[in-house]
Amino acid sequence: MPEEESYWVKRERDNIKREQMKDEEVSRKLKGIIDHALSEVEKEINAFYSRYAEKNTISLAEAKKRVSEFDVQSFERTAARYVREKDFSPKANKELFTYNTKMRINRQELLMMYLNAHLVSMTNEQEKTFQDYLEQAGISEVLRQAGILGVNMAITTPTLKSIVGASFYGANWSSRIWGDMEALREELDVIINSAIVRGVHPNRYIKKIRERFDVSSFEAKRLLITETARVQVEAQKLSYQAVSSDDEAEYEYVAVMDGKTTKKCKLLNKKKFKVKEMKPGINAPPMHPFCRSSTALDLGDWREEFFASVKDKYTL
């Protein structure tokens, strides 16, 4: 007969379901940001061909013709508007001018400058969405644990920023987002160049472009879910440490048990580990991309004893 789960573990499983719903909502927002960028990219490509193409194609010679000073200044006005209206981060400002706006650029380079501007705007919005959601996830988890553990706890801003911005498997989420944008930009450059060399309209490649944007949507969702799990588990560890100075204190691994559960999480489910040794990716979630497992402090008789003695307010 299977061992009955504790009330707190069952409660943790219910919370996992609620968190999954939140993740889906923000994932849809990220997809909307990426879909909008795709739409703008398609518009820029069509505008480029409307201006310079003959019979729906453009020769390599035409594409390599220098643009006028007016065209460059027009782009610079567009770039300035993006910076002003979209509240670009320092990273976004730097990426915006990856393609040098010198006067001696050609038409193809100007097109890529416009496409780059849309990609930078997209990534800047993604970064802000991630930052806000992950910070809120950390704060909410500390407050939730405070309710479970029956204490008043708060997390300091420096601690929160440190957790949210931490590296995981060699890179933090922000660098991964910008890295995907750079890869997308390079692939667009190859597609545009290939279309011009072959003398065809890039619409012939539009399916490939859309498929690549779909990859970006998938990777953004995967990163969001995985990083949210990491931030929440780090917040759990801080909460557990704040209320238990016992080096022997333990937590239980709580896996999402369904048809999609990975072998790793199945093996870890219900296993207990020392809080002081808790480490995401090693003995705590996330153990893999899309991991939505969680943990629960092994309370035992400690909870009743603790309630009788604790009166302090905790700041993590």
Image: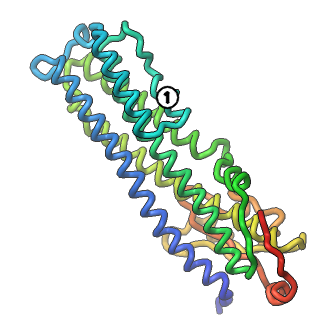
Determine whether, in the image, residue 9 is placed left or right of residue 212. right
Where in the figure is residue 291, as x and y percent of width and height? 57, 62
Quarter of the image with the N terminus is bottom right
The amino acid type of the residue labelled 1 equals Glu
Residue 66, visible in the rendered structure = yes
Q: Quadrant of residue 255?
A: bottom right
Residue furthest to the bottom in view is 1
Q: Residue furthest left?
A: 55
Report crowding for label 1: few under 14, some 14 to 19, many 20 or more residues within 10 A (C-alpha): some
Image quarter for residue 232?
bottom right
Residue in the image at 19% along x and 23% along y: 49
Task: Say which of 311 and 264 sits in front.
Answer: 311
Q: Which residue is mark 1?
A: 95
257 relative to 193, above or below = below
* Image coordinates for residue 107, horizontal then vertical, percent: 29, 15
* SS type, badge 1: helix
What residue is drawn where x is 79% and y is 73%? 313
Q: Which residue is at a point 65% across and 48% down the rendered structure image?
A: 165
Left or right, 150 with reference to 227:
right
Residue 193 in view here: no
The x, y position of residue 71, in whole percent, is 28, 16
What's the coloring here? rainbow
Say above or below: 130 vs 71: below
Question: In which quarter of the view is residue 138 placed?
Answer: bottom right
Query: Considering depth in this image, is 205 or 112 the residue closer to the camera?
Result: 112
Q: Is residue 200 above or below residue 239?
A: above
